[in-house]
């Protein structure tokens, strides 16, 4: 991940608004004992949006240039919504560095120290409302493809346990967008699942079977995963579930989940997969 950081630095140094002393801070570790959020963040000052405009560029333009450059080295996907943990890391870094209203920064967030992390979130953040809020735009960077069949890094699968009921498992979640907008774009989850099944049948693995009903444990894991976000009506997420230790899991459940009834319910499409 240090290579990715160096690419960021190289491109940012091309921007006239930055002075030669500007560079990313060292990784800092942040932990919320109450909520269990933890991760690393590094930060680089960018000045203000007004200063950028005076020098003939915008932060949106900079972000697109970064994505274009990094796509030659790694997989890049847009970040459409921040999870609660990601927001915690941003606020922690901004507070730690005494960032002020109107100032913009490049942040890199990781679940592990950046020299070993394979996945990071790069954000351009502008502070507003006395550090109580910020606006942002960014993307995920994945340096290596995961061997996990559901497309999630093993390290991204979070453990959930309900002491009262004994329900236990692992899940990962990623925001896809508003379902109404996805439908306008022609996204058909039933068709996507059908295509995945067809390709799996041709390849001989993994073995894919329909999921027609969620168990109590599976529903618990979906809700647990959704709670990683401030989810709202009509939002659609991709959720991966396994009841086995991620390191040894050879089966799981893949779901497209759309929030309904003002956040009180959800509907879903999905399938089970398992290795031969």
Image (tube, rainbow, N blue to C red):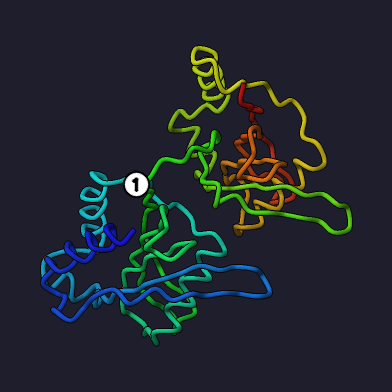
What's the residue at 45%, 28% (across, down)?
A: 186
Q: Quadrant of residue 243?
A: top right
| Residue 188 position in % (x across, y down) | 52, 26
What's the residue at 55%, 28% (across, down)?
A: 189
Q: Quadrant of residue 4?
A: bottom left
| Residue 50 position in % (x across, y down) | 21, 75
Looking at the image, which is closer to me, 201 or 99?
A: 201
Left or right: residue 212 compared with residue 226: right
Residue that label 1 marks: 76
Left or right: residue 133 compared with residue 254: left
Q: Secondary structure at mark 1?
A: strand
| Residue 207 position in % (x across, y down) | 61, 20
Q: Which residue, as the protein is rendered here, is positioned at the far bottom?
A: 98
Q: What is the count of numbered marks? A: 1
Q: Quadrant of residue 204?
A: top right
Looking at the image, which is closer to me, 20 or 99?
A: 20
Left or right: residue 64 compared with residue 232: left
| Residue 39 position in % (x across, y down) | 51, 67
Q: Which residue, as the protein is rendered here, is positioned at the far right?
A: 164
What's the residue at 21%, 78% (across, down)?
A: 22
Looking at the image, which is closer to me, 254 or 138?
A: 254
Look at the picture and state if 24 lies above or below 239.
below
Left or right: residue 103 compared with residue 12: right
Around disc 1, counting alpha carbons within 10 Å, would you say few (fewer than 14), some (14 to 19), or many (20 or more)? some
């Amino acid at each position: 991940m240090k290579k990715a950081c160096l690419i960021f630095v190289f491109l940012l140094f091309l921007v006239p608004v930055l002075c030669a002393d500007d560079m990313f801070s060292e990784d800092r570790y942040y932990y919320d004992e109450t909520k269990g959020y933890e991760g690393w963040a590094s930060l680089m000052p960018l000045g203000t949006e007004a200063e950028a405009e005076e020098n003939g560029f915008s932060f949106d333009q900079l972000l697109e240039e970064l994505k274009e450059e990094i796509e030659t080295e790694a997989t890049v996907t847009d970040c459409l919504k921040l999870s609660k943990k990601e927001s915690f890391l941003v606020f922690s870094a901004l507070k730690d560095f005494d960032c002020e209203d109107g100032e913009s920064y490049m942040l890199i967030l990781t679940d592990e120290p950046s020299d070993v992390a394979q996945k990071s979130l790069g954000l351009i953040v502008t502070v507003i409302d006395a550090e109580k809020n910020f606006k942002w735009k960014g993307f995920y960077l994945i340096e290596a493809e995961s061997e996990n069949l559901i497309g999630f890094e093993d390290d991204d699968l979070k453990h959930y346990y309900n002491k009262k009921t004994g329900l236990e498992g692992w899940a990962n979640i990623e925001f896809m967008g508003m379902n109404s907008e996805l439908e306008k774009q022609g996204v058909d989850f039933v068709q996507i699942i059908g295509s995945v099944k067809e390709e799996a049948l041709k390849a001989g693995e993994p073995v894919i079977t329909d999921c027609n009903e969620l168990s109590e444990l599976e529903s618990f894991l979906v809700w647990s995963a959704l709670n990683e976000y401030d989810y709202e009506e009509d939002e659609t997420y991709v959720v991966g579930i396994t009841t086995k230790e991620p390191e040894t899991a050879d089966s799981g459940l893949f779901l497209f989940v759309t929030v309904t009834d003002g956040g009180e319910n959800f509907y879903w499409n999905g399938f089970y997969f398992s290795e031969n």
